[in-house]
Amino acid sequence: MSEDMRYGYFDNQNREYVIDRVDVPVSWTNYIGVNDMCAVLSHNAGGYSFYRDAEHGRITKFRPNGVPMDWPGHWIYLRDQADGDFWSVSWQPVGKPLDQAEYECRHGLSYSRYSSEYKGIRAEQLVFITREDDVEIWDVRITNTGTTPREIAVFSYLEWSFHHIEIDNQNLQMSLYASGSSYAEGVIEYDFYYEPWTYHYHAASFEPDGYDSVREAFIGDYRSERDPLAVASGRCSGSQELTGNHCASLQKTITLQPGEARRLVFVTGYGNRNVGVEKKTKYGNFAAVDAAFADLKRYWDEKCAVFEAKTPHEGLDTMANIWTLYQAETCVHWSRFASFIEVGGRTGLGYRDTSQDIMAVPHTNPKKVRQRIEELLHGQVREGYGLHLFDPAWFKPQKKLEFKSPTIAHAPAKSSYIHGIEHACSDDHLWLIPSICEYVKETGETALFDELVPFADEGIGTVWQHMKAGLDFSARQVGLSGICKGLRADWNDCLNLGGGESGMVSFLHFWALTNFVEAARFLGREKDADRYAALAEDVRDACERELWDGLWYARGTTASGLKIGTRASEEAKIFLESNTWAVISGAVRRDRAESALDAMDEHLFTPWGLHLLQPSFSKPNDEIGFMGRVYKGIKENGAIFSHPNPWAVIAAAKLGQGARAMRFYDSMLPYNQNDKVETREAEPYSYCQFVYGAEHRRHGRARHPWLTGSAGWNYIAVTKWILGIRPGFASLLIDPCIPPEWDGFSVTRKWRGATYDITVSNPAHVSKGVKAIALNGEPVREVPAQPDGSLAKVEVVLG
């Protein structure tokens, strides 16, 4: 097999990624659902669904990290009743040889479309979740492309979860006797008897010819989903049962004349049989299905229209206008704990992750971002640090249950979820401060700063007071040198410095302080502005005094005083995080910033992205933490960790180095690796958590797609720093940093109710520097917010 291999392509007109070679080496997934219900499905329709909570709200079952991969799934089987041959609309689970059948998967924005062509039958299964009422729709269309009539039996199939991930996988002495299934009125109802409020349903637009709701009856003895007994025999057995393992399969046999097509719709959701009857009646009207899908398409059309770029770089346009925005939105909505990697074993929000995620999408999802800001503030203790992993439900009134079910996860006592400083991370709370400022810059909602939000442990404060609490906490938590303490960990979870100091956090503290001071000046709160500006200068002095190592900035020190990330270090001489944030924060001298950037390029750059550190740790060192117990070139120990890579792009852009910023951006851009799947393996439309580093024999392999802060930060890097469109408190800043060979670019940007058509020309072929700006034909120095509903034409000349 060749080194370079393509399995699919980008269809930008339809905002879809088309997988036309389906034997992909790993699962290529998509996220279905934008409200309370979600399905995570692969290119073979394998995966699972849940309602609100992937840990305690599971609808369908999934066997993670399994062989075969992606099983079970949300599948449609077809059987030729004349000869008994059967297949699935998606390539798996039946898996017909690819020289006998044609398969395709189109992953779109919150939907996936599977299709097959086999023996004169063309079939398609569109999977999406309605926005209006959280119903999973399988819109199935079957066409006879042959010259003779065909009798085809159609079977839906899914396997019900036991609702809680832990009893799906552990507590079978309870789960096998906790649930039951039944069929009536065309609906399979699944109940979780220990929880009388929990039901799921599966129904269809037609009167079924048969059904099964017991897994073993549908699949049969010594068989699997690849060759289930019901499909092989051509009929379901009508199974239903109290206790055991449960599935949902509805069967319909149809006759198709040559050229004839039939449409069948299946519905699945959270609710009892009455809800199922209501939804199958509603979506039995195909016009309602079409309207729901059009509504979903319109939802994403409106989001994508908020920022649309047209540049000389097709990959940048494809990712920034569609896929990176989509991935960033997905992270804000579902956090980190619902994927094929994090399969619902945890729930809630990671404080630092969510605080960064929301920074990327206040323009496309202000309502969700505001919700997350409130939840994060409520997850902050009065002392100033954030609860590293918490569930916002802890702080909401708990529904009084009639009994205490042994299967349900009840909210813990408050004393157990308010952890002490010994478990606090030194960076968590700092990310939220710039994110709040970015939200206000986007929306103009300055009143948010004075809104009251409770602390997690006790008391209540304004948003402004919460922000000050976080800044003051970091000011108190410093070592003798004046550099912030590392505490349990900083951004790097595997760098556990404990009593040591983190250079990255001090740079981050400076950045948060300058964001806060900018807001204070805008609001006229001069006393706060002066106080925190003075503190920022103290932080700057400490960073320059203690962290500069001659060519780049040190990462920090251990509890014993050993400096790490220096030229004298035995291993891990240079780190990406501390040096990128030295530049981004604005805390350091320009000549040192340029030297640090040069060093990152020289020592960390590869064609697949920049390493997190080099060289990797080769032996454990408990003073440094868990990092030394990770293989070289993997994850935090010398991998190309995706999350901080866009920080290098931003750093280069801030210094006006457009060619370098683009080279950094291009090295990790999934789009550029579309024809290198034999190395990359993972989806070319999604950023991954990390890429194997050069010290590993699988250098270039990407792992853990979708739910990673890489998406939001790459979106920020390209839209706000390469293209340079940055909202302020009162005006729209346009300050690009582009490759000098570009002639220019254009962006349509919606901001505070107005639309800005921005054209940037680069006649002098520079990377950075705005020579002139015209607003609606008139020269201006800046672009102030325009009236609601207006269209503003902005022309920018670089030079």
Image: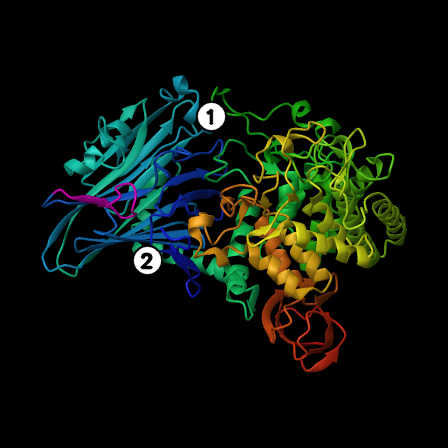
Tag 1: amino acid: Glu
User: Looking at this rendering, what residue extends furthest in the top direction?
Assistant: 173
Give coordinates of residue 87: x percent, y percent. Answer: 22, 45
* Camera sees residue 270: yes
CA neighbours of label 2 inside 10 A, class few (<14), some (14 to 19), many (20+): few
Q: Helix, strand or loop at disc 1? A: helix
Q: Which quadrant of the figure contains the C terminus? A: bottom right
Foreground residue among 176 and 40: 40
Q: What residue is drawn where x is 80% and y is 46%?
A: 549
Seen in the image, is 656 located left or right of residue 225?
A: right
Write down the residue under mark 2: 287
Give coordinates of residue 248: x percent, y percent. Answer: 29, 35
Pointer 1 with pointer 2, Cβ within 8 A: no
Tag 2: amino acid: Ala
Write down the residue under mark 1: 166
Count of marks overlaid on the render: 2
Q: Is residue 441 magenta?
A: no
**Earlier residue among tags 1 and 2:** 1
Query: In the rendered structure, which segment of residues is drawn in magenta?
Result: 84-96
Q: What residue is drawn where x is 66% and y is 34%?
A: 388
Seen in the image, is 601 located left or right of residue 143?
A: right
Q: Helix, strand or loop at disc 2? A: helix
Above-or-below relation of 643 to 306: above
Give coordinates of residue 520: x percent, y percent. Answer: 82, 54
Q: Is residue 89 magenta?
A: yes
Above-or-below relation of 148 to 183: below
Q: Main secondary structure of the magenta part?
A: loop
- Foreground: disc 1 or disc 2: 1
* Camera sees residue 361: no
